Image: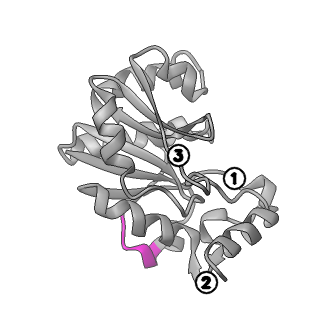
Amino acid sequence: MIAGIILAGGLSRRMGGQEKSLMTLGGRPAISLLIERLAPQVKHLAINANGDPERFADEKLPVLADTVQGHVGPLAGVLTGMEWAAEQGASHVISGASDTPFIPLDLVERLSESAGDGIAMARSGGRVHPVFGLWPVSLVDDLRHFLVAEDKRKILEFAKRYELSEVEFDMDDDPFFNINTPEDLDIARKRLGL
């Protein structure tokens, strides 16, 4: 069984502090578009975000704060997702960025087919997207040690300690396009025909 964790814990520095996942596209927050595409692919879904969870109340999903303090990056969200997924009885958790509204509808299926006993990550345009990974929940203690005892942060540095598969998604428009700047928001609106 696979659970999903949406990583919304970033500080949105390039958007002037405005929360990227709540930027509207066609009157809907970007995170809503991601949820619409990811929810049918997993058994359980939650949002990883620090601060007031009420800002995501309309999504009707659990909102989980990082279990490692100090805004240490997306791996803290993956760890939080692993811990929560274990409580749900899941064997794996899929992570994805909250500001990425165009993910493939077969993301979980394709990563699952390639993961084996290791980790699988998405690629597009010849570039790996480390936040879009399928993680065995059995690595939860290793990941906590990496973040806390080793004080390390890099997703690929952790992932390369294990069997790592990269799955290429060839599409005309990058399915992992994410909204980092006001210009990106305009591009996303155009892709949606807005």
Q: Quadrant of the C terminus?
A: bottom right
- Image coordinates of residue 16 in percent, x first then y, are 82, 62
161 is higher (above) or lower (below) than 106? above
Question: Was residue 60 drawn as part of the magenta stretch in this picture?
Answer: yes
In front: mark 3 or mark 2?
3
Q: Is residue 38 left or right of residue 152?
A: left
The circle drawn on residue 26 is 2
Q: Amino acid at mark 1?
A: Leu
Disc 3 target residue? 170
Q: Please name whichever residue, 65 or 182, is drawn nearer the observer in this view of the structure.
A: 182
Q: Is residue 80 left or right of residue 12?
A: left
The local crowd at label 3, few if under 14, some if 14 to 19, many if 20 or more residues have their Cα within 10 Å, is: few
Residue at 36% in and 39% down: 111
Q: Amino acid at mark 2?
A: Gly
188 is higher (above) or lower (below) than 24? above
- Image coordinates of residue 71 in percent, x first then y, are 62, 42
